[in-house]
Image: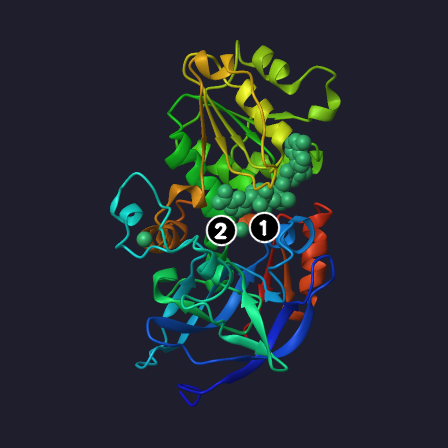
Amino acid sequence: MATVGKVIKCQAAVAWEPNVPMVIEEIEVAPPQANEIRIKVIATGVCHTDLYHLFEGKNKEGFPAVLGHEGAGVVESVGAWGNRVIKSFPLFLSQCRECRFCKCPKTNLCDQSWSSDRYAQMSDTTTRFSCRGQPILQFMGTSTFSEYTVLNQVAVAKIHDDAPLERVCLLGCGISTGYGAAINTAKVEPGSVCAVFGLGAVGLAAVMGCKNAGASRIIAVDINEQKFEKAKIFGATDFVNPKSHKKPISEVLAEMTNGGVDFSMECVGNGAVMRSALESCVKGWGVSVLVGWTDVQDFSARPIQLISGKTWKGSLFGGFKSKDSVPKLVLDYMAGRIMLDEFVTHTMSLDQVNDAVQLMKTGGCIRTIINLSK
Ligand SMILES: NC(=O)c1ccc[n+]([C@@H]2O[C@H](COP(=O)([O-])OP(=O)(O)OC[C@H]3O[C@@H](n4cnc5c(N)ncnc54)[C@H](O)[C@@H]3O)[C@@H](O)[C@H]2O)c1
Ligand SMILES: [Zn+2]
Ligand SMILES: [Zn+2]
């Protein structure tokens, strides 16, 4: 390819500062260095975590940056070699296969993922992006709101040649997260009663996970009743709007389930909802999983909640070891074992990225796909 080894000029949505819409800019993307891969992004989803970074987070240091971490594309060039067209998948959670955590089957938290360097920039702390001479940070080591991006090879998976990128990109974050929270972290059992709090893409995917794991009853909880119809498609059997009840939601669920649910998943990112999700579990064996993202420093629960035999745990990227699992999830979609199409409510171009963010902010979408292929 003509671009191998050269700087590529392309369009990207640059978040210059917090609480200000992103600006479509021409950026320069440097060639990949050793152990890096430059990817032409074909499609990307917009996740609540992008919104969180832009508007809700307290990380004022993380700007200017190119956001986006739910993308799929093709390899443009790899370090010093090769230019085969390979469908490839940027992973915000890496899998180096060498660290203590990668070697342990109990977790997916690769040690390389959350070093502050890789989180904000590339592996050697110098970003590959610049705009008008100024370095631009790479969000979550991925930055898929750009026509081209550079990733460390520990954060790229190769996926099936026939994978439809404008669908499987969703496996880059929200869907894998919710689905895995149910099947890997909660380990939902056949015949069990589950409750999912929050019915965005993450929560709907958790509903899908509960259903695939054989749950007999799945209670969908959201303050936006428009989400209930979608939740039904993914397998929800009961629907609760906390705003329609004067009692705490845990009491409502306890009455509906003879004492509480077997498994609950918090997919909102709200400390109070996390507490009610735990309180909604049955004593003795109930398991509650935190999935929603929040920068609440402390949150509380009465110790009796845990003394009485409940388990409270959390899940990042659904507990999936990313490089190993994403290619398999792609095959699951292609074989009809998991749904993806049903999550897509809007398709837009890169210059509409602020509209996509706004839609998510107002609850007007499940997932918007930004199509970058030209
Ligand atoms: N742990 C992880 O690996 C991971 C990965 C991706 C996203 N997340 C987080 O998961 C959360 C959900 O992401 P999303 O993309 O589905 O977001 P979303 O904004 O599409 O969905 C959130 C849903 O929660 C509902 N909600 C808000 N307040 C509620 C309340 N008090 N009770 C019940 N429902 C309520 C909203 O109406 C909405 O339907 C976010 O916090 C996101 O940052 C975590
Ligand atoms: Zn690792
Ligand atoms: Zn995300």
Q: Quadrant of the N terminus?
A: bottom left
Q: Earlier in the sequence, mark 2 or mark 1?
A: 1
Report if the CB atoms under discs 2 and 1 are less than 8 Å apart. Answer: yes
* Label ID, residue 49: 1
The residue that disc 2 covers is 173
Classify 97 as above or below 129: above
Q: Position of residue 302 (x, y in %)?
A: 55, 16
Q: Residue furthest bottom?
A: 2
Q: Residues within 10 Å of mark 2 (few under 14, many from 20)?
A: many
Q: Quadrant of the C terminus?
A: bottom right
Q: Quadrant of ligand 1?
A: top right
Q: Kindly tell me whether mark 2's CB lies below 8 Å from ligand 3.
A: yes
The residue located at (43%, 81%) in the rendering is 31
Closer-to-camera residue (136/9):
136
Q: Kindly tell me whether mark 1's CB lies below 8 Å from ligand 3.
A: yes
Classify 258 as above or below 85: above
Res. 211 image quadrant: top left
User: Disc 1 on helix, strand or loop?
Assistant: helix
Classify 5 as above or below 50: below
Closer-to-camera residue (339/33):
33
Res. 273 image quadrant: top right
- The amino acid at mark 2 is Cys
The residue located at (32%, 81%) in the rendering is 80
Q: Is residue 23 left or right of residue 325?
A: right
The residue located at (63%, 15%) in the rendering is 252
Q: Is residue 352 left or right of residue 255?
A: right
